[in-house]
Every structure is written in C-alpha cells, then in structure tokens.
Image (tube, rainbow, N blue to C red):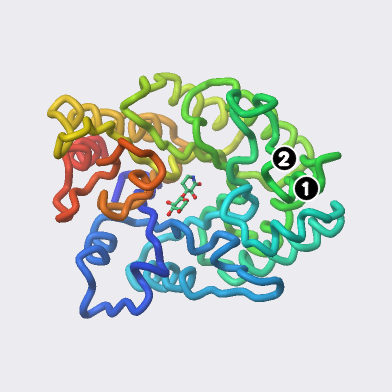
Amino acid sequence: QAPRDLEIGSAVWGARDLVGHDKRHPTQHQRVLAREFGSLTPENDMKWAEVHPEPGVYDFTGADAVVDFARAHGQEVRGHTLLWHSQNPQWVLDAAESWTCEEARDVLEDHVRTVVGRYAGEIYEWDVANEIIQDDWDVGGVRLRTEANPFLRACADDPVALIGDTFRWAHEADPQARLFLNDYNAEGINEKTDAYYALAQELLDDGVPLHGFGAQGHLSLMYDFDPSMQANFERFAALGLDVAVTEADVRVPIEPGADGPTPEQVALHAERHDAMLQACLNVLSCTSFTVWGFPDARSWVPDVFPGEDWATIFEDDYSPKPAHAAMLASL
Ligand code: XIL
C-alpha cells in the first residue's frame, strides 16, 4: 500500500477470472491480484454489452464477482464505464438509429441509475464518461464524439447537457462515488487534453458533480513519453479535481522472429511505467494508479495492436518484471 491516499490497482475480468472464486483455493492469478493491489477495475464487466445485454435485462454476474472479490480482500473498486462509444450492445446500436434525444436520455438514465445504484457505497471512483472527445486524427478533429457515441449522437444539439446529466444521475445514485472523465492520449498537455480542460471547466461552472480526470496511460515504446504529464495533472488538480492513471500499460514492439523484448526495451518498459507513477505521486490530488490487467497472456494488447506485446508488469509465469520493481521503489 502506498503512502498517503494513493490506491494501486489492476483491471480484472470478473466473468472470466473471478466467477466461482473460492478464497481457500485461489488461482495463481487471484492470489497475485489479492496480494499486489488495493483497487480493482472491472475490465469489461460493467460495460453496457456485458451488464445490459437486452432492453430491460441486466446481468451482473461478472460485475458482482469483481465487487465480491474486492470486498473479500479489503480492496476498493473503480467503476468502468457508463457513457462510451464502444462495447455497446446491439440493441442500443439498433435503437439508436431512430432515437430522439429524449429517448436516448431515458435509456441512459435508467442504465446509470440501475448500475450505479446497485453498487452504491461500494465504488470509490466511477469512469462516468469514457473517450467522449475524439483525437486530432479522427474525422473532424478534436471535439466531442457526437458521431461514434450513440447517446451523444442523439443529443448532438447539446451534448454537454447530456454529459452533465449523466454525472448528475450517477451522483444521485451514489453520492459517495467520485465521478471521472477518462480517456487515452490524455496523459500530456495536448489539443485533446486542452479540450478536456475546457469541458471540465464548463461542467463545473454548470454545477455538475464532476470530481476527477483520468488518463488511461496506454503507452507504447513506438512513441516518446510526453514529459508534460505531471503539468497536465497539475492543471486539472488546480480546477479542484482528482486525477488518476486508470489503465496503465506500456506496449513493446516485438521484432518478427524475436522471442521477447531486448534489454533496452525491458529497461524502457520499466522507465515508462515509473514515469507515469511519478507524475501521479508528484500531484497530491492523484488518487489512484491502475494497471490494465496482467499477465501478458491476459492483456488486451496483442489482440488489438498487432506486432506489440509484453505490455503488463508480470510475466506469464507471474514473476514480476523490472517495471514492478521500479514502481515499488518509487512508492
Ligand atoms: C478493453 C479490454 O481490455 C478488452 O478486454 C476489451 O475487449 C476491449 O476493451 N480503453 C478503455 C478500456 O477504456 O475499457 C479498454 O478495455 C481499453 C481501452
């Protein structure tokens, strides 16, 4: 456990790895999860497609498994996520084709109140809105994701009002939870985080219960580290917000034919993890630092980024990598 109030967490896929958990006979994965981390984020289990597969039908199997495991081990839970353009069930995508804003709002409100309400008092931070600003390389450049996100699309006339109300519904359902905006490519100061900074100010001016800004922390050794991460966190903290690193991993491009990273890559993989942790440690309002699952065999990276791997801090035999030692030394 870190000094001050910093939680060190990991993502875990409850439906895959925790259902049927028996405290007396844990799997190796469960043992490491319990031993190393004070906070858990359901990697998929609280997303729309998992938790709300049909209209009016909720399935909390995986989400409950995460919350139960956390309770059994004295861990905190970060909720993830309520308003996102990805991993929405087919029925939402179909219905959205003809949604009015009013209809979209009703569906979202029911979902937010149901899911947040179920775990009221058990979740310390919620990623309420995920990836709602697109990148400069997306069509139309940096702006709210009013095409890909079916809810924002239906309410494209005033998407900020919908975002604000989503936070209000979540706050009513669980007044204790700290409510976050969350995104990738949001570590340093850039055009996207400038847009988040403006959005956060607008929401706060409107009295919206926004409490935090999360940088996912999905890095790759293919790109340089942006040293403005701490300064970026500081400017959000100056708005009165908490900040967090919510999904840290560092992808390593593996040469075809190589059976692992080079020693230089191993060192850089540790250095990048530690740099993100340092940015968090140096900002008092940084409340949590979460890695996006382990070991590499369970990581989302090889599926989504061909040619990149070795992104997590544990080897497949659960031995800790140098990144683990580097971060421990900083805590
Ligand atoms: C990823 C999960 O890790 C995968 O298992 C799933 O197939 C796709 O989503 N940003 C986010 C996370 O906010 O929810 C994503 O998680 C990774 C990128």
- The residue sitting at 78% across, 54% down in the picture is 97
- The residue sitting at 68% across, 38% down in the picture is 145
Whether 152 is drawn above or below 283: the answer is: below
Q: Position of residue 57 (x, y in %)?
A: 65, 76
Describe the element under mark 2 as helix, strand or loop.
Answer: loop
Query: In this rendering, does residue 270 appear at all?
Result: yes
Describe the element under mark 1 as helix, strand or loop.
Answer: helix
| Left or right of residue 78: residue 151 | right
Quarter of the image with the C terminus is top left
Asked whether disc 1 touches disc 2, contact meaning CB atoms under 8 Å apart, the reply is no
* Residue identifier under label 2: 147
Report the mark closest to the observer, 1 or 2: 2
Name the residue type under label 1.
Leu
Which label number is shown at residue 244? Answer: none
Q: Position of residue 264 (x, y in %)?
A: 16, 25
| Left or right of residue 173: residue 10 | left
Residue 321 in which image quadrant? top left
| Left or right of residue 39: residue 195 | right
* Residue identifier under label 1: 162
Give how far apart the Cα atoms at labels 1 and 2 are: 14 Å
Residue 76 in which image quadrant? bottom left
Q: Position of residue 290 (x, y in %)?
A: 39, 47
Name the residue type under label 2.
Glu
